[in-house]
Amino acid sequence: MKRVVITGQGTINALGRDVAGTLEAFREGRCGIGPLDIRDVDRLSIQIGGQVRDYDPHAEFNRQQIALYDRYTQFSLLAAREAIAQSGLDFVGQLADEAGVVLGTAGGGMNTQDENYRAVYEEGKNRVHPFVVPKLMNNAAAAHLSMEYNLRGPSFTVATACASSNHAMGQAFQFVRSGLTKAMVTGGAESMLCFGGVKAWEGLRVMTRDVCRPFSANRNGMVQGEGAAIFVFEEYEHAKARGADIVAEVIGFAMSSDAADIVMPSKQGAARAIAGAMKDARIDPADVGYINAHGTGTAANDKTECAAVANVFGSHADKLMISSTKSMHGHVIGGTGAIELLACIMALKDGIVAPTINYDEPDEECALDVVPNEARAASVKVALSNAFAFGGMNAVLALRQV
């Protein structure tokens, strides 16, 4: 099997328009969640979110492109632009045939759906733009990335709710490790912060109206975010031969299904995915120094995740650092695992562990080191990234320092 390394990373989210800005926010423990600036926000019970503020698509794309690109696709393209530029790869010749793209998204073109629903039912229009379907489809971002960068290998989208990005990156990892591809552009994107998207989430009654407090005893729900993070996964020898700057190595991945409940998480399912990722990576529990938690800030998720970690790691659980950056950028649903992978890479490469902010009260059911409120300098050799989705779909990635 081939070794797989990360040679490019890019992002746009509520904390920053690039990786440098996002990592600075992680180090400072800065919160990107605030009042929503969307149409008809006054009709919503939940009026906060991790929104990409002051975003002007016309500054990045021409009119024809905007007609084709939903907001989530725009975010994907902007993050990919940064990641591919950092990687230094030029997808021409044989490499183009041996490179592809796998992205995660849950809602796809939700903004496009919302806008066109309004056009027909509120404004009384009887026709919509001819490109509404290719604009809103879940594979639109992957398609446009493949066309923009001449990626002629496997290209597709994974939609597993909140685990979409981790599943996508896991598939990309397996493609490169198996030798099927030399490089993959991978990650995820989401933009559900429109009236219909937020109203739908309100119905679940899992949202907070103030702040996201993962693992804190007084936590009262999650906050939606939006954005994208994209990475270049590359075969190690290929990257080494061209002198690429390697930021981390991907060493393991595992998936599991709870097969139990459509919304309630399972300790057993999460534990199997965590243990499976370590088995795939051929590492012991004691090797892991940091876990970026799924950590949504809901009562059920956080205690279930902590119980799963305690179950898998035993006595080593007390020595682990586990934090949720959703407290800063919100829950980016299908794109969240990709944005959170940035925190894992920061821990491995820079020796800085991102905090769980807004932590007020210890919870005996979450009695782990959640890196409360302030980033921490620490030597981390191996990190895990957890993602546990509605539907009981779990995906965990393992990364190592290089």
Image: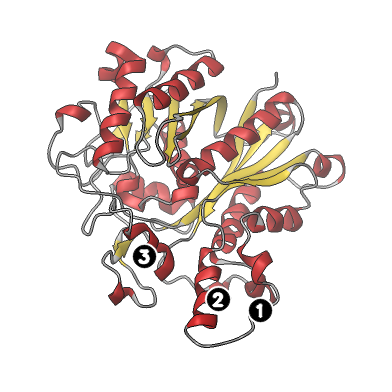
Circle number at residue 199: 3
Q: Which residue is mark 1?
A: 129
Q: Residue at x 54, y 81 (%)?
A: 120
Q: Tell me: 156 left or right of 19.
A: right
Kindly indicate the quadrant of the structure image that contains residue 383: top left
- State the SS at label 2: helix
Query: Residue 376's spot in the image, x, y percent?
Result: 28, 34
Point out the residue furthest to the left here: 361
Real-space Cα separation, disc 3 to disc 1, in angstroms: 25 Å
Q: Is residue 225 above or below residue 387?
A: below
Q: Quadrant of the C terminus?
A: top right
N-term-proximal mark, 2 vs 1: 2
N-term-proximal mark, 3 vs 2: 2
Circle number at residue 398: none
Question: Which amino acid is tagged 1?
Answer: His
**Colour scheme:** secondary structure
Q: Tell me: 93 left or right of 21.
A: right
Q: Which residue is mark 2?
A: 116
